[in-house]
Image (cartoon, grey):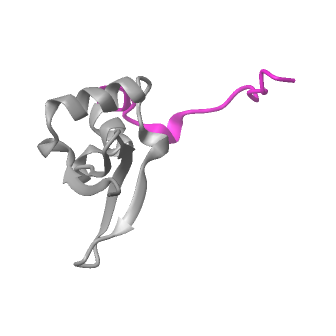
Amino acid sequence: MGKKRIIKNYEQLPEDIVEQVKERYPDGFEDNLITFENSRGEIELALPFETEDTYYLIKMPKNNTAEEEEEEDYDNTTIDEFDNFENLEITDDVADEEE
């Protein structure tokens, strides 16, 4: 008999599978995510993951993408320090460091 195939939300994974995912992707799994269309026509983000006896398609929460996390972590206080952008001048051209 072949391996079981399971689609499961990340939040509902057993702790041992979560630990296996962390071990396999210690630097993050963002580059391994895929998108697919579910039965309701919605686009889902998921991680394919294989154990000895099971193929998992781990659905990621929609609010947990790397881009959204970066936006949430962004601190607007530095922008608020500049009240009037129209009066800013560029005095020297900035050259690439690789030149």
> Residue 40: where, in percent of width, then height?
22, 78
Question: Relative to 62, does residue 13 appear above or below in the rendering?
Answer: above
- As for residue 15 lying within the magenta part, the answer is no
Q: Residue at x 52, y 36 (%)?
A: 87
Q: Residue at x 27, y 49 (%)?
A: 60
Q: Quadrant of residue 52?
A: top left
Q: Residue at x 41, y 31 (%)?
A: 28
Residue 75 visible, this angle: no
Tell me the quarter of the image containing the N terminus.
bottom left
Bounds of the magenta segment: 74-99
* Foreground residue among 30 and 82: 30
Q: Quadrant of residue 62?
A: bottom left
Residue 95 visible, this angle: yes
> Residue 66: where, in percent of width, then height?
37, 41
Question: Relative to 13, does residue 56 appear above or below in the rendering?
Answer: below
> Residue 50: where, in percent of width, then height?
37, 44
Q: Residue furthest front?
A: 1
> Residue 16: where, in percent of width, then height?
20, 29
Q: Residue at x 34, y 56 (%)?
A: 45
User: What is the magenta segment's predominant secondary structure?
Assistant: loop
